[in-house]
């Protein structure tokens, strides 16, 4: 069978194209679908028609590949046109979806919104469980094998709580700072008044001494 496969270029192209399309289904967004369609198209033409020249098949592969690439980019089958598509498991981090099978720390299943032809993934949580139907976000893609996910509702509540706590803390700090500033202003005013009173008293005392000296000189 292998001899027949490698001896027939058209059949080889068809087989390789089908394998690439299967891989695309397992790893959505890797763009293998374009190459797969090109190979399958050229392979089918070679199998169904008496085209045995490798050069003709190569030209057909290139032509069909260009057409497939144009259609793929133009119609945006994965959604999110104008945004980067998933090219590897690492870019699954931050993806959202919902639970199709209750997710626990040991396992479960989720469906990602932009998961392509195979949007279902095995998943688990870091703690607790997420019930079926709840929206989730991917925290760790885990190499694409088992995703670590968290409930969007839980994350939203935590962020709101942190924001409220931060605002309350800032308000308390402002309230504590205002009385302190008022006390400092009052102390400064009191000190200034006391300094002015002492200066005035000193001036009066000096004036009295000068008058006494003058009267003594007159008496002498």
Image: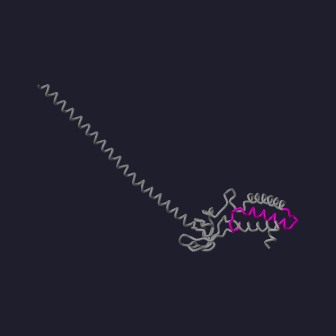
Image quarter hosting the N terminus: bottom right
At 35% from the left edge and 49% from the top edge, which residue is drawn? 183
- Classified by dominant secondary structure, the portion drawn in magenta counts as helix
Position of residue 64 in the picture relative to residue 156 (left or right): right
Residues shaded magenta: 24-53
Image quarter hosting the C terminus: top left
Please say if 31 is above or below 192: below
Position of residue 209 in the picture relative to residue 78 (left or right): left
Place residue 212 in its image quadrant. top left
Q: Residue furthest left?
A: 220
Along the viewing direction, whichever of 133 and 75 lies nearer the viewer: 75
Place residue 103 in its image quadrant. bottom right
At 71% from the left edge and 61% from the top edge, which residue is drawn? 31
At 75% from the left edge and 62% from the top edge, which residue is drawn? 35
Q: Percent from the top left, x then y, of residue 118?
A: 69, 68
Q: Percent from the top left, x then y, of residue 217?
A: 14, 26
Q: Percent from the top left, x then y, of residue 78?
A: 70, 62
At 86% from the left edge and 67% from the top edge, which residue is drawn? 48
Position of residue 121 in the picture relative to residue 202 (left or right): right
Along the viewing direction, whichever of 73 and 7 lies nearer the viewer: 7
Instruction: Answer whether residue 146 is magenta in the image.
Output: no
Along the viewing direction, whichever of 126 and 98 lies nearer the viewer: 126
Position of residue 106 in the picture relative to residue 197 (left or right): right
Instruction: Answer whether residue 32 is magenta in the image.
Output: yes
Please say if 175 is above or below 132: above
Along the viewing direction, whichever of 8 and 124 lies nearer the viewer: 8
Please say if 109 is above or below 189: below
Q: Residue furthest right?
A: 50
């Amino acid at each position: 069978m292998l001899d027949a496969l490698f001896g027939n270029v058209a059949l080889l192209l068809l087989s390789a194209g089908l394998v690439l399309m299967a891989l695309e289904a397992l790893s959505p967004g890797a763009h293998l679908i374009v190459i797969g369609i090109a190979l399958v198209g050229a392979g089918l033409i070679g199998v169904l028609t008496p085209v045995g020249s490798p050069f003709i098949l190569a030209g057909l592969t290139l032509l069909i590949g260009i057409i497939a690439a144009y259609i793929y980019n133009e119609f945006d089958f994965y959604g999110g046109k104008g945004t980067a598509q998933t090219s590897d498991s690492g870019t699954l981090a931050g993806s959202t979806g919902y639970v199709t099978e209750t997710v626990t720390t040991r396992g479960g299943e989720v469906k990602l919104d932009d998961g392509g032809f195979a949007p279902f993934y095995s998943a688990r949580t870091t703690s607790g469980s997420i019930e079926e139907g709840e929206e989730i976000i991917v925290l760790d893609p885990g190499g694409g094998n088992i995703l670590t996910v968290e409930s969007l509702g839980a994350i939203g509540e935590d962020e709101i709580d942190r924001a409220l706590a931060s605002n309350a803390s800032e308000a308390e700090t402002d309230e504590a700072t205002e009385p302190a500033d008022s006390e400092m202003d009052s102390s400064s005013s009191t000190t200034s008044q006391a300094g002015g009173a002492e200066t005035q008293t000193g001036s009066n005392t000096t004036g009295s001494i000068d008058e006494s000296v003058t009267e003594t000189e007159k008496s002498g």
